[in-house]
Amino acid sequence: MDRGSDENFWVFAYGSLIWRPDFPFVEGVPGRLHGWHRRMCIRSIHYRGRPDRPGLVLGLDRGGSCRGLAYRVADDLVETVRRILDERELISGVYDPRYAPVTLDDGRRVAGYLFVARRGHDQYAGGLSTEETAAMIRQGHGSCGSSRDYLANTVRHLEILGLGGASLRRLLQLVDEPVAVPS
């Protein structure tokens, strides 16, 4: 879906952009993106992990749908906001920026600027078991903190905003379970 010249610029947030947008916006409206779901499937080697001990962060992966927040950006700030987002999200090429239709809770349908997981990228971790996912989240600490705190912040904000997140809440419970140390 292309962003038409007469449309406003909308950013679709599904993870940390919900609780840390880092850009100015005019309004934030809950909405649904079809064809993609949020998943802890991106090995983080900068913000929430290191190359030798990656953490995991969210990506949009194929299939299903995703509830999130759509932020409308003022026309005079579109290029600035796009630059901020691209600098934040495109540091390693694991995300593919694109526009996709988002249906807002108030009935409007907008072209959302968003970032989907590149399945062929070496940071894509969509094939991990639940236990492997939890272990990688436990180990991840990077320049912006831990992968566990990233997950917890996302779960908390999804709950506060009524945007779902039950599967992420279950994953967080698994991450927080005591890990047996082999004797």
Image (cartoon, rainbow, N blue to C red):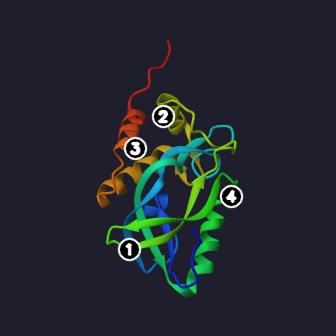
The residue to which callout 4 is attached is: 91
Cα distance, mark 2 to mark 3? 11 Å
**Is the Cβ of the residue at disc 4 closer than 8 Å to that at disc 1?**
no
Residue kind at label 4, given as amino acid type: Ile
Tell me the residue that label 3 is attached to.
168
C-alpha separation, residue under disc 4 versus residue under disc 1: 32 Å
| Mark 4 crowdedness (10 Å alpha carbons): few <14, some 14-19, many ≥20 | few
CA distance separating discs 4 and 3: 25 Å
Assign a secondary structure to mark 1: loop
Report the mark closest to the observer, 2 or 3: 3
Query: Helix, strand, or loop for circle 2?
Result: helix
Residue 148 or 115: which is nearer the viewer?
115
Residue 108 has which mark?
A: 1
Find numbered disc 3 in the image and state the secondary structure of the residue it sits on. helix
Distance from label 2 to label 1 (Cα)?
37 Å
Indicate which disc, 4 or 1, sits on the residue closer to the N terminus.
4
Pointer 4 or 3: first along the chain: 4
Nearer to us: label 1 or label 3: 1
- The residue under label 2 is which amino acid type? Ala
Q: Residue at x 64, y 73 (%)?
A: 83
Q: Which mark is residue 134?
A: 2
CA distance for labels 1 and 3: 27 Å
Position of 170 compared to 121: left or right?
A: left
Sequence-wise, which precedes: disc 2 or disc 3? 2
Where disc 4 sits, the SS reads loop
